[in-house]
Image (cartoon, helix red, strand yellow):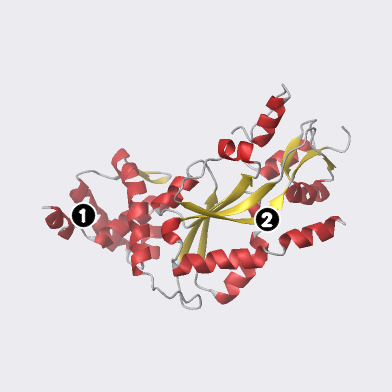
């Protein structure tokens, strides 16, 4: 019975559903599939019959998925990721590959790390795509499920706090890229728990959080108009301080360095495409600490 059910599944229909969920548009999904809109509409009709659900409703904002479709979305990500790995050639050729890497990145990696390797990737692998997403609490699970290929975020180096601030599953591999320290940012005239919270707690202190914003740039911008203090990795603090004419200050308490760290699932350890991207990032960022120290002096 198991094989009989599998034989009835049309993978092309599942790919259509996956892209409709991503694009929320028949037109855009058709463009990515290189099909006509009518062909995609016919596929959607078949999908509705197969799953016995309307799957989408039309609104002025585009296609809105039903609860059934939303439940299918994560499963489709995992399934199609595994299928992509199976069909990818064992010998990865960056010049001819159309591989789409999915990365979960902490925000500060964009100005710090990406400029060091993006030009190389664009030159050596012109058809490869990097599909980046914000690092969040689900990124490690997405690495485990195959929904993402690689993740980069900061990891506390102090063993006392490392497992408290971020527990890394045993099947997740990692490689340190670059170490940095935290600094404060304030104007010239004037989660979320992380390691600073625990260090302050040791002294019977705590942060007074004035506002929660979605990104580093917004936080830094607020410092230009208020007496708020923004704490972030030093490389970002020094970069944005010059742009916004802000003052850089040390932390009020000693805080161990953190390390920008590369994460991937152990099943991707010997995957040719994943290895190529990991090595590209590591090799092009290996001199970052040396150059940063030189800039400081």
Q: Secondary structure at mark 1?
A: helix
Relative to 140, 53 lies left or right: left
Relative to 158, 66 lies left or right: left
Q: How many discs appear?
A: 2
Q: Residues within 10 Å of mark 1 (few under 14, many from 20)?
A: some
Res. 275 visible in picture: yes
The picture places residue 108, in percent across and down from the top left corner, at 66, 50
Residue reaching furthest top?
Answer: 204
Q: In front: mark 2 or mark 1? A: 2
Relative to 268, 154 lies left or right: right
Residue 207 is marked as none
Q: Which residue is mark 2?
A: 178
Which residue is drawn at the image coordinates 44% and 66% (left, top)?
271
Res. 57 visible in picture: no
Q: Which residue is mark 1?
A: 46
Which residue is drawn at the image coordinates 21% and 54% (left, top)?
46
Marks 2 and 1, how far apart in space?
Answer: 50 Å
């Amino acid at each position: 019975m198991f094989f009989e059910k599998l034989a009835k599944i049309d993978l092309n229909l599942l790919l259509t559903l996956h892209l409709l969920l991503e694009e929320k548009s028949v037109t855009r999904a058709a463009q990515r599939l290189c099909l006509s809109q009518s062909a995609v509409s016919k596929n959607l009709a078949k999908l509705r019959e197969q799953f016995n659900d309307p799957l989408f409703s039309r609104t002025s904002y585009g296609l809105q998925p039903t609860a059934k479709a939303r439940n299918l979305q994560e499963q489709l990500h995992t399934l199609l990721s595994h299928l992509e790995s199976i069909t990818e050639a064992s010998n990865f050729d960056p010049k001819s590959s159309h591989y789409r890497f999915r990365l979960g990145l902490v925000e500060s990696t964009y100005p710090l790390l990406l400029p060091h390797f993006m030009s190389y990737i664009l030159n050596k692998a012109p058809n490869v795509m990097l599909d980046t997403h914000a690092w969040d609490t689900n990124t490690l699970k997405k690495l485990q499920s195959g929904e993402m290929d690689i993740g980069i975020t900061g990891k506390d180096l102090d063993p006392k706090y490392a497992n408290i601030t971020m527990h890394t599953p045993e099947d997740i591999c990692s490689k340190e890229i670059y170490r940095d320290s935290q600094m404060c940012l304030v104007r010239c005239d004037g989660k979320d728990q992380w390691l600073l919270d625990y260090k302050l707690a040791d002294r019977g202190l705590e942060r007074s959080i004035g506002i929660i914003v979605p990104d580093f740039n917004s936080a830094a911008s607020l410092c230009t108009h208020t007496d708020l203090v923004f704490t972030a990795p030093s490389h970002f603090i020094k970069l944005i301080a010059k742009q916004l004419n802000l003052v850089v200050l040390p932390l009020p308490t000693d805080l161990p360095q953190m390390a920008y760290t590369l994460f991937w699932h152990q099943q991707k350890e010997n995957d040719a495409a994943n290895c190529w991207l990991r090595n590209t990032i590591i090799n092009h960022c290996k001199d970052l600490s040396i150059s940063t120290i030189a800039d400081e002096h």
